Amino acid sequence: MLRIYLFAASLSALAQAPCATEAFKRYDYVVGEWAVTRDGKPVGNVRYRKAVHGCAIVEDYTGPGGISRKGLLYFDPRASRWEIIVAGTDGLLEGHETAPDV
């Protein structure tokens, strides 16, 4: 019985391992809740959270007048770069681009 448990635990760790590399942790510093300001005045709130076992970061933004957007920041290992895709309350895709280098 113990062998089965250890084997299952090893498989679980392997399933999560691909997104545990340093490349997937590059934007971990943004994870949390932030006040968004422009010229020192509040214009909204944004929350970033890790998703899909650390393979992506989800952005939830709310602003004045019911404005909202949802973004997905993810690392593409085939291209060795971060990508971001954002959709807003207007129903349009706002952008798909390489994430800025920091």
Image (cartoon, helix red, strand yellow):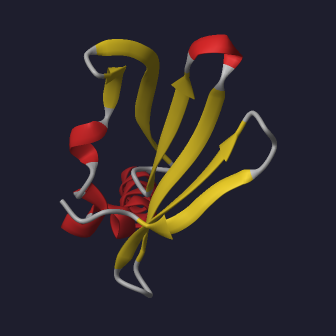
- Check the image and report above or below for 94 versus 35: below
Q: Which residue lies at the image location 56% right of the left edge and 45% below the top edge?
A: 71
The x and y percentages for residue 97 are: 50, 68
Instruction: Name the residue located 25 percent from the left edge and 16 percent from the top edge.
Output: 40
Q: Quadrant of residue 17?
A: bottom left
Residue 76, percent from left and from top: 45, 75
Q: Position of residue 81 (x, y in %)?
A: 36, 76
Q: Is residue 31 above or below residue 37?
A: below
* 42 or 79, nearer to the observer: 42
Q: Observer-nearest residue: 19 or 34?
A: 34
The quarter of the picture where residue 98 lies is bottom left
Which one is in front, 10 or 75?
A: 75
Question: As displayed, is residue 2 above or below residue 63?
Answer: below
Left or right side of 82 for 68: right
Seen from the viewer's position, the closer of residues 39 and 19 is 39
Count of marks placed on residues: 0
Residue ID at (38%, 59%):
3
Where does residue 59 sit, x and y in percent of width and height? 49, 38
Q: Is residue 89 left or right of residue 4?
A: right
Q: Quadrant of residue 41?
A: top left
Give the farthest residue toward the right: 91
Left or right: where 35 falls relative to 22: right
Considering the image in quadrants, where does the C terminus appear? bottom left
